Amino acid sequence: MRMKEFGKLGFKTSLFGLGCMRFPQRRTAAGPQVEAGEAIKMIRYAIDHGVNYLDTGYEYHQGESEVIVGRALRDGYREKTKLATKLPLWRVKTIDDCRRILEEQLRRLQVESIDFYLLHAVNAERWRLVQDLEILAFLEAMVRAGKIKHLGFSFHDELSVFKEVIDAYPWAMAQIQLNIVDAHHQAGVEGLHYAGAKGIPVVIMEPLKGGRLAQTIPQDVLDLWAQAPVKRSPVEWAFRWLCHFPEVTVILSGVSSMAQLKDNIGIFTRMETGGMTGDELALVEKVRDLYLSKTKVPCTGCEYCLPCAREVAIPWIFALYNDIFIFDDRDGAVNRYRELTAQGKDASRCIECGACVAACPQKIPVIESLKAAHRELTGRGV
Ligand code: SF4
Ligand code: SF4
C-alpha cells in the first residue's frame, strides 16, 4: 500500500482511505439496510491490507456508519487506524448541539478520541454559522480535553469561499471533491494547490464522482481510454490522475462490495505518485472535455439558488439531467428523480417566482432548464 506523510503531523497514512458511506445494503420492507457483518469484514480486510485512514460521518447510513465503524475497530483495530468523522453543521443551532453531537459520536464509535474532526460540507452560509457561534473555539477546547486530535473541514462551494476558509485557520487538513471531470469545479485543482502551498494536507472525496466514473461509462469515453499505450481500467486512470498531485494526501473511496475493495487495494498497491506522463495527462484532458461536452446545464452545484420557496431541488435535478447525457445513466437518473418527486422536490412544484434565476451566478435560465429536465426525466411536461 502506498503511504504518505500526513503533512507535518509526524505520521504516515495510506493514500487509499476507506470512505464509510457506501457500505453494502440489502432491500427490506422498511427500506435499505446496511449489511453490518459484511461491512465490518470489509473494514478489517482493508486495515489488514495496509489501509489506515477511515472516513465516516454523523449522517452516513442514517447514523449506522459510525456504529459499524466502532464495532469494526474493536479487537485491536483502533490502534492501527486514523479515524475521521464530521460535525453536521446543518444540525447545529447552538454550541450545546455541537457538544451533544460530539458525545454521541464518541459513544457510537466507542473511542476516547477522534483523530480528525471535520466541519462537514462547509459552504459560505455554514462558514458564517461557524464564525457566529465560535464553533472552532469550542472544538479547540475539545482538543485540549483530548476528545479530538486534529481539526479540519470538508468543503462544497466556490473556490473563493474555499480560499477564505483556508486562510482563516491553521487547519490540520482540508477535504475537497476532486476527480478527472471536476478539475475546475468547487475548490478544484486550484484549491488543491492553494491549500498545498499553505502546507495543509488535502484529502480527496468523490474521486469517482459518486461511482459514475466507474460504472455506465459511455463508449466514446472507453474508446479514448483505449488509445493509451498502457491499458488500465477507467477507475485506475481516475485514481492515478489524483495521485499525480503531490498535495493529495489521502484519496477516499467509498466501496460497496468486497470485490470493489480488493480492486481498489490492488490499484493503490501498484501506484506511485508522479506516475503520469505528459501524453497521459493530455489524454485525461481529452476525456474530461468529452464528458463536459455532453453537459446540458452548466450548473456548478453552488446552491446559491436555494432555498427555493417550493423546495424544488434545483441543483440535484440538473445533476440528474446531466447524468443522462454525460454518463449514459438514464435509468439511475430516472429512479433518483422519482425519489425526489416522492419527496415533493421535483420541477413540477415550481411556481416560476424567478428567485433562483436572479440568484444564479452562472446565468442559467433555471425555469426553462427545469422544464427541459422534467421532460427528459419523466417523458412528459410539468
Ligand atoms: S422559480 Fe421555481 S424553482 Fe426557482 S425559486 Fe421560484 S419556485 Fe423555486
Ligand atoms: S442553478 Fe445556478 S445557483 Fe443553482 S446550483 Fe446551479 S449554478 Fe448554482
Image (cartoon, grey):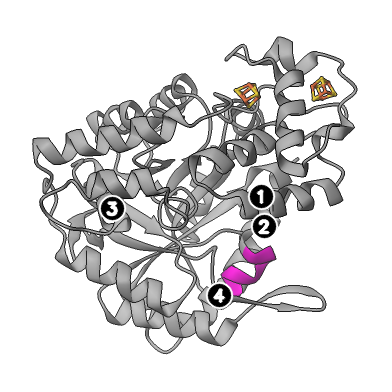
Mark nearer the N terminus (4 vs 2): 4
From the viewer's perspective, tell me whether residue 347 is left or right of residue 143. right
Secondary structure state at the residue bearing disc 1:
helix
Separation of residues labelled 1 and 2 (CA atoms): 5 Å
Q: In the depicted view, which residue is nearer to us: 8 or 292?
A: 292
Mark nearer the N terminus (1 vs 4): 4
Q: Are marks 1 and 2 in contact (CB under 8 Å)?
A: yes
Q: Residues within 10 Å of mark 4 (few under 14, many from 20)?
A: some
Give the x, y percent position of residue 162: 45, 27
Q: Which residue is mark 4?
A: 24
Mark 3 or 1: in front is 3
Give the x, y percent position of residue 80: 31, 76
Q: As shown in the figure, which amino acid type bears the numbered disc 4?
A: Pro
Q: As shown in the figure, which amino acid type bears the numbered disc 2?
A: Ile
Q: As shown in the figure, which amino acid type bears the numbered disc 1?
A: Cys
Image quarter hosting the C terminus:
top right
Q: Which residue is mark 2?
A: 101
Q: Are marks 4 and 2 in contact (CB under 8 Å)?
A: no
Q: Is residue 318 visible?
A: yes
Secondary structure state at the residue bearing disc 3:
helix
What residue appears at the point 24 percent right and 71 percent down from the top-left corner? Answer: 266
Q: Which quarter of the rendered image does ligand 2 occupy?
A: top right
